[in-house]
Image (cartoon, helix red, strand yellow):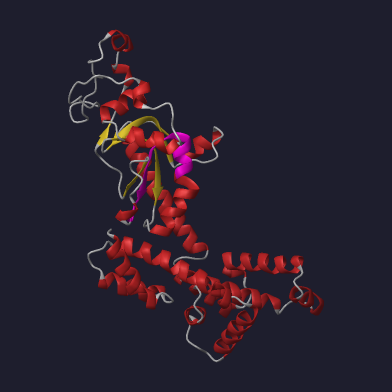
Amino acid sequence: MDLSLYLQIESFVQPHLKDFDKAIQLVINHFPQVRPESLRSILAQLYQRFIKLNYRVAHSGEKRRKIYKEFVSLLQSGSEQGIIIRLAIENKTSPALAAKIIVEEYLKEDLKPDELEEYQAGDKKAYNSIRLRATQLLKNHALIEDADLAYEVLLAKLRDHCYGQIAESIKQSIGEEHEQRIKDKLTELNIPFSDEHVLRSRGCDKTPDVKLEVPVAVNGRVINWIESKALFGDRESHEGYLKDQFWSYWNRFGAGLVIYWFGYIKQLDQNTEKGIILSDHLPTDIVYYQPDLVSRSSQLNSSRSASALVTSKQDSPFLAASNKRDRLSLGELITTKRSSLSTVDESLSQLSLQEIEDVSFG
C-alpha cells in the first residue's frame, strides 16, 4: 500500500476511533479497493494508540469512581443492555478496560473499613489483591455474584476487538494460523526448517518463526529465516519490530524475509539491500540449492571460468546458471578494511545471484 493511501485511511478514521464497530463499517464502505482484513488491522493499530493516548485520563482515580457510579445508576434505572460498552465509548476507553474499572470498583465495596483505608493509602498488598481478584472475574464472568454485572461484563468482552481475554485469544489464533501456513508450505516444498521452539531448545534467545536449515533465494536474494506477522505493517509497528526483532535475527542468522500478511506501507521496504525483505505473502518463485550435486573436487580442479551446477525449479529443483564468468576470490568480494557490519552487507548486496551463491554456499 502506498503511503498516500494509508494517510487517507488514517485521516478518515480519526474522528470515529472511539467507536471501533462504527469505524470499521465506515472505513470498509469508504475504501472498497482495500482488503477488509487490511483495513481492520490498520484500524486496530490506530484504535490501540488512541486508547493508550487517553488511558491516563480515562483511568484516573476520580474518573474511575465516576464511571462506576454512572454504571450503577444506569443499571438501577433499567437502562438498555450494553451499559459498559456505551460508557467506554463516552470515556474514550475500550469496553474490556471499562469492565475492568467497574469490576475493581465493585470489589472495593466489599472491603472492610481498614482494608479500604489501606487500599486508598496505596498499600501494595491490598492493591494487588483487588487486581488479582478482578482478573479472575474478568476471565470467568460466571464467578461474579451479581447477574446483571456478569452479563454486562460478558457483552463488553465480546464487543472489544483489541483488549481483553477474548480479543487476545483471537489475535493469538490468527497469528498461529498464519505461522502454520508457512510451515505447511515449506514442508510441501521439501524445504527443511526449524521453528522457534526447536531454536529455543538449542539455546537461541532471539528466534524467528522459521529458520531455514538450507538457505533459499527469493527474487534473487538469499534468505535464511522467515518471520510471520498477521497484521498490517505501518511505520510505528515496523520500526519497533526492526529494533526489537528483525535486526537481531539478521545479526544471528543473516538475511531474512518478513511477511506482513495484511499488507504494509511500501515505502517501508528500504532494507532489502541490507538483508530484510518485506512481502505480504509467501513467495512462490523460490530458488533452491542442493550442494550434493556439486562436485567439490571438480570445483577445486576446474578453471576460474567454471560455473556452479544449478537448474530451475520448473525443470528440477535447481536454477540454471545464465552465463559463465570468472569466479572472484573471497578477498575481492569482501574488503578486509570495513567500518561496520552494514558495509559488508551492502557489499554483498551488490553481487549477482551467481556470486552470492559462490560465497554463501561454498
- Using the image as rendered, state which of residue 46 and residue 36 is in the foreground: 46
Residue 150 screen position, x and y as percent: 57, 75
Q: Is residue 249 magenta?
A: yes
Q: In which quarter of the image is the N terminus?
A: bottom left
Quadrant in which residue 208 is drawn: top left
Frontmost residue, 105 versus 76: 105
Q: Is residue 247 above or below residue 79?
A: above
**Seen in the image, is 50 located left or right of residue 135?**
left
Instruction: Judge whether 178 appears above or below 204 on screen.
Output: below
User: Relative to 169, does residue 209 appear above or below in the rendering?
Assistant: above
Q: Residue at x 47, y 79 (%)?
A: 89
* Residue 315 visible in image: yes
Is 233 displayed left or right of 107 in the figure? left
Magenta stretch contains residue 199: no
Q: Where is residue 107 in the image (x, y as percent from the top left)?
A: 68, 75
Please give the range of residues in magenta. Answer: 247-264
